[in-house]
Amino acid sequence: MSTITSIAEGDITAAARPMRLNGNLSPLQPRQHNGDAHGRMSPPKGNTSKYLHVTAVHSRRKTSCLSHDSEDSPSFLGFRNLMVIVLIVMNLRLVVENYMKYGVLICIRCHDYSKSDLRLGLILYAMVPCHLFIAYLIELGAAHQAKGAIGRAKRGGRKPEAVAAIARSFQSIWLFIAWAHGINATLSLLVTTITVYSSIHHPLIGTVSEVHAIIVWLKICSYAFTNRDLRYALLKPEAASSLPKLYSQCPYPRNIMIRNLSYFWWAPTLVYQPVYPRTTSIRWTFVIKRLAETFSLSIFIWLASAQYAAPLLHNSLPKMSSFDMGSILERLMKLSTISLIIWLAGFFAIFQSLLNALAEVMRFGDREFYTEWWNSPSVGTYWRTWNKPVYHFMKRHIYGPLVGRGWSSNAASMWVFVFSGLLHELLVGVPTHNILGVAFIGMVVQIPLVFVTLPLEKVQGINGKIIGNCIFWVSFCLVGQPLAALLYFFAWQAKYGSVSKQRVS
């Protein structure tokens, strides 16, 4: 027995000992390198043992990469790619399903708009900017009066009684200027609103006219407010120190020129400044590319609206009439996809393509028309980042002055949303001839959402921001736009029927 054991041990020792063939190592001996040219596994570095089956695979404590206590954050690039593929496949399925059910619904000649609608729209588009010229005339007279007041003060040796008398005399002029600007701005918006609501039937023509009127109205207000403060700084030299240094390039009243106002009219901003940052040249290739993007996305929005949104809205009417809540919720979820796609396409077409093309032509330097609103950790962050031109106007001419007058920041923010709600109702209710208050309520409802999600911005770590971002997307995609579109479409159909001659079965 002992003989057999010794023979076996000798065989094992011989098998483990390297063998040499013609002076070279036997293929049985492992090579000490990290791998061959074909990528075959080799023994770990530092492993001098000839018994490879005893390598310590579990040498230290490790955590799963998806665990909260993991040292390194894993990359989810693969999951992102998966989500993109799933979204593409799901939407392609909807495209196929839509085609099999309805066929091709695109019809260029089916839209029922009258020549009077088009004529009135063009007249309004040409008349509204005339109120900017009236604002210029008002400011021209105000600047003349301000320079006259300064001249009288200098002739009077700037005695206290003379300065007080001039201030009293200019007070009445100041009020007259304010009323003149107020009446001019109000008429610029009121005339268009009444005309669109009473005389323009087609909602698209009415919407374009109303949007243009609101933009010009905001520009007139900004022009009047800014020049009022510049005029005050001229009359009160001690207040001039608070003016931005940029304005020294064109001090008041040298900025009261037709050329200066014309630039503000076409500049992609709602906030008036005597001077803006400018670029040195115009890149016409850049302009052509941005205009091509705008045109292509506009065609896409039209096709998506006619082929996908319109059937969904039409098929929702019986469910709305019978107040079938389950079916209405299903339609809202179905409508949320196409409404989000249309909104995103519209956002890119306007804020990325059109405004950048306009800024390039005007050599407008500040092109931060939006920031990363899609990553908003709260509803308030979204409203501060998705539409920078409107945000700058609200902050500069409404929020800031209210806080300066002693309002709390919360009260001033609430009033901003109320004011924005009124503008949204004009923008949606007037062209559809249905002032339902839905757009106004939709903006006012944002106030509690802002305060609810505000603490999530301050939560340490990523969890709070993720929850806030999810609340924003749910309120935006599912409750906001689809519900508003459904309600206004239902009201339009109940009042007028379809704009299109084509009916969807």
Image (tube, rainbow, N blue to C red):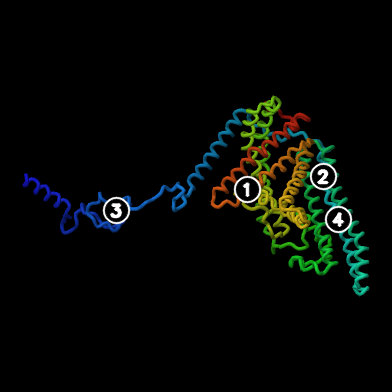
Q: Which residue is mark 4?
A: 135
Sequence order check, earlier mark of 1 and 2 = 2
Q: Residues within 10 Å of mark 3 (few under 14, many from 20)?
A: some
Circle nearer the viewer, 2 or 3:
3
- Left or right, 488 with respect to 475, comes to right
Q: Which residue is mark 2?
A: 122
Sequence order check, earlier mark of 1 and 3 = 3
Q: Residue at x 75, y 48 (%)?
A: 415
Residue 143 x, y percent position in the rendering = 87, 63
Q: Residue furthest bottom?
A: 157
Q: Are marks 1 and 3 in contact (CB under 8 Å)?
A: no
In which quarter of the view is residue 23 placed?
bottom left
The three-letter amino acid code for the residue at tag 2 is Leu
Circle nearer the viewer, 2 or 4:
4
Q: Are marks 2 and 4 in contact (CB under 8 Å)?
A: no
Sequence order check, earlier mark of 3 and 4 = 3
Q: Residue at x 84, y 64 (%)?
A: 232
The residues tagged by marks 1 and 2 sit, at their Cα atoms, a distance apart of 41 Å
Q: Which mark is residue 378?
A: 1
Sequence order check, earlier mark of 2 and 3 = 3
Q: Which residue is mark 3?
A: 42
Would residue 401 be visible to someone looking at this image?
Answer: yes
Q: Residue at x 65, y 28 (%)?
A: 325
The residues tagged by marks 1 and 4 sit, at their Cα atoms, a distance apart of 39 Å
In which quarter of the view is residue 440 placed?
top right
Q: Quadrant of the N terminus?
A: top left
Sequence order check, earlier mark of 1 and 4 = 4
Q: Which mark is residue 151?
A: none
State the residue in front, 250 or 205: 250
Q: Residue furthest top?
A: 322
